[in-house]
Image: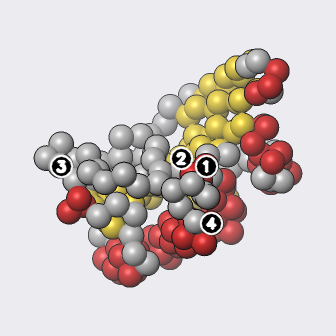
């Protein structure tokens, strides 16, 4: 079942469209993929150090060069898992777009052709992931009962697969990211 919800906000925000898919993707393995070292978490799992958590902190808490390096690692992490599973396309399971922010990023043409249920290529996944990491969009991607990518707050990403994806996990760790067994909250 699919719902379209349009929310009118004050004029300075223009509008946000929420598209929600109630269908879920169930897989055997799920991981949290982050830039945060799990050794620096407390007993409740909270990260102990003050670190940047958003694209909007570029120039304040993180340099553009360091931000782009980490952003690219996250995008390559998705590609590594897709390649490990021989997946060339995924479906959009949930999508949220902010028209004002997309205009700033000059990506309106790309996102205007996206909808829930659409199959997108690895190249399109990379573009949508970049917009999501920059908080210009939000999405859930996947292939039902085989694979998913969910994005959370504070630069948390969740990937699930019906395979152990050992090669992908090692590849992602070589990019400087951490892969922890973890159930997606999304």
* View extreme (left): residue: 43
Q: CA distance from mark 1 to mark 4?
A: 10 Å
Q: Which residue is mark 3?
A: 42
Which of marks 1 and 3 precedes in the sequence? 3
Q: Is residue 57 above or below residue 180?
A: above
Quadrant of the rendering where the N terminus is positioned? top right
Q: Which residue is mark 2?
A: 140
Which of marks 4 and 2 precedes in the sequence? 4
State the SS at label 1.
helix
- Residue 59 in percent (x, y) is at 61, 58
- Residue 15 in percent (x, y) is at 76, 27
The answer to whether residue 120 is left or right of residue 47 is: right
Q: Are marks 2 and 1 in contact (CB under 8 Å)?
A: no
Q: Are marks 3 and 2 in contact (CB under 8 Å)?
A: no
Q: Is residue 29 above or below residue 116?
A: below
Q: Is residue 108 visible?
A: yes
Q: Which residue is mark 1?
A: 56
Which of marks 3 and 4 precedes in the sequence? 3
User: Residue 64 — which label?
Assistant: 4
Q: CA distance from mark 3 to mark 1?
A: 26 Å
- Residue 4 in percent (x, y) is at 67, 25
Q: Nearer the viewer, residue 114 or 152?
A: 152
Residue located at (65% from left, 44% from top): 137
């Amino acid at each position: 079942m699919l719902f379209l919800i349009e929310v009118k906000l004050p004029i300075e925000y223009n509008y946000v469209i929420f598209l929600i898919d109630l269908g879920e993707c169930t897989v055997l393995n799920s991981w949290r993929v982050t830039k945060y070292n799990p050794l620096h978490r407390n007993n409740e799992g909270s990260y102990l150090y003050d670190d940047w958590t958003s694209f909007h902190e570029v120039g304040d808490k993180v340099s553009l060069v360091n931000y782009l390096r980490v952003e690219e690692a996250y995008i390559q992490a998705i590609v590594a898992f897709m390649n490990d599973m021989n997946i060339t396309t995924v479906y959009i399971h949930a999508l949220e777009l902010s028209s004002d922010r997309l205009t700033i990023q000059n990506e309106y043409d790309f996102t205007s052709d996206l909808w829930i249920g659409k199959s997108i290529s690895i190249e399109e996944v990379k573009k949508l992931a970049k917009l999501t990491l920059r908080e210009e969009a939000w999405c859930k991607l996947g292939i039902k009962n085989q694979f998913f990518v969910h994005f959370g707050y504070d630069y948390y990403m969740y990937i699930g697969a019906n395979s152990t994806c050992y090669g992908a996990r090692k590849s992602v760790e070589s990019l400087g990211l951490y892969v922890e067994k973890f159930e997606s909250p999304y």
